[in-house]
Image (cartoon, rainbow, N blue to C red):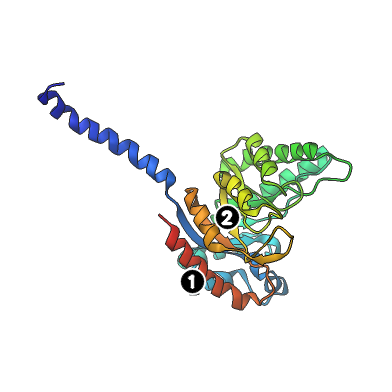
Amino acid sequence: MNRRELLTSMPLLAAAALSAAPNESLAKKSRLRTAICAYSFRDALKAGTMTYADLVHMAVEHDVDGLDLTVYWFPNTTNDFLLPLRRLAYRSGVEIYSISVRSEMTRPTPELRDKEVAEVKKWVDVAEKLGAGHIRVFGGSVPKGTSEDVAASWVVEVLKRSAEYAATKGIILGLENHGGITERAERIIDIVKKVDSPWVAINLDTGNFNRNVFPQIEMCLPYAANVQVKAEMRDESGARVRQDWNKVVQMIAKSGYKGYLALEYEAKEDPAVAVPRMMKELRALTRKYSA
């Protein structure tokens, strides 16, 4: 290549480098945001001493980016409740990015699994009205007398069918590691792979694994669409201990995860006191480790 050819090709080479390098680097960069799980205030929501609108105001007061709304205590699912809540969140600069619903996908009969699919579809419609792009779902327990492999196949069936509908609304279903059929990282990853849908992922709870906690968290991170952090985790003896959030968030960031870290508070201290303090800590870590 002579000098003239080299000079002519340099802009093209530069453009090619710019088009390739940012994509590779962006894949490795984390983008972390903070959120509160409504379940942290389950007692107050159940008793009616706190409303979902109160959670929006709390997010504003404590500089929290988003909310994962556990739906168990919704007064109803009519537009009269959902749309004003969506409007309040938007006008407050808070994203209702996820809702959490009850599900038991290991139902042993086709009729019961049909009901599970119908229930998930109902909540997909609710999520759409709230502007949430993610729904946290649960696999369920392994029925007595049923092998884990068979129970897992039922979860795959329900998730596949549910995802077909969720895809039409642009909503991701996040299967949580929540004991039962999803007690181990290997199993929940296998389920998500077999569903094989861009609309099904893992809702990773950093406090739910009983053993080998950090290796299992690391295994799940490539498949995670949402991450929940807990104040506590189980150590190898099974005792509840304070989770090392610096280690957890650093691990999450290293994986290139982009999304929310939602505090789901379940420890003994009053959440009205503990959650604001812990959100301050979580916010500092997300800012420290976001690329």
Going by the numbered disc 2, the residue's amino acid type is Val
Q: CA distance from mark 2 to mark 1?
A: 21 Å
Residue 63, horizontal then vertical, whole percent: 47, 70
Displayed quadrant of residue 102: bottom right
Q: Quadrant of the N terminus?
A: top left
Q: Quadrant of the C terminus?
A: bottom left
Left of 131 or right of it: where is 7? left
Q: Residue furthest top?
A: 1
Q: Secondary structure at mark 2?
A: strand
Going by the numbered disc 1, the residue's amino acid type is Val
Residue 61, horizontal then vertical, whole percent: 49, 75
Check the image and report above or below for 125 versus 73: above
Q: Secondary structure at mark 1?
A: helix
The residue singled out by tag 1 in the image is 60
Residue 119 visible in rendering: yes
Neighbor class of circle 2 (other Cα within 10 Å; few <14, some 14-19, many 20+) is many
Displayed quadrant of residue 23: top left
Residue 210, horizontal then vertical, whole percent: 71, 55
The residue singled out by tag 2 in the image is 227
